[in-house]
Image: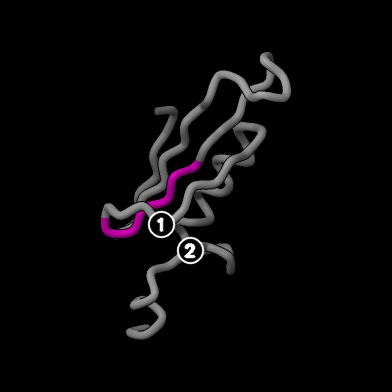
Amino acid sequence: MYSEYYNGNKKAVVNKKTSTNIDENRSLWEVSMYIDNRIVQKTNAYNEQQAENIAEDFINAGAQTSPTLLNEHLNG
């Protein structure tokens, strides 16, 4: 695990993978997004900054494309 972000019931975990099938020297970053400790989405990024931005957008609900649970829309 590289880093974790928390905000209320949301959590994002950024992991660094060592290589991709494209280039053994290139890193791949994975962002796992959770709501109430249930994974709702995994997204890949090709650099650290992009992965961190995805994680921060998710937990801060800054991106319109941030995943949410269906009942958040019904109750919200």
**Which residue in the structure is indicated by mark 1?**
40
Residue 68 screen position, x and y as percent: 43, 67
Amino acid of disc 1: Val
Task: Please give the range of residues in magenta.
Answer: 31-36
Tell whether position 70 is magenta: no
Question: How busy is the neighbourhood of tag 1: few (under 14 within 10 Å), some, or many (20 plus)?
Answer: some
**Which residue in the structure is indicated by mark 2?**
67
Describe residue 30's horizontal placement relative to residue 11 as left or right: right
Give residue 35's quadrant in the image. bottom left
Residue 74 screen position, x and y as percent: 37, 85
Position of 1 relative to 73 (above/below): above
Residue under the image location 44 percent in, 45 percent down: 32
Q: Residue furthest front?
A: 21
Residue 72 screen position, x and y as percent: 36, 76
Question: How busy is the neighbourhood of tag 2: few (under 14 within 10 Å), some, or many (20 plus)?
Answer: some
Amino acid of disc 2: Pro
Is the Cβ of the residue at disc 2 closer than 8 Å to that at disc 1? Answer: yes
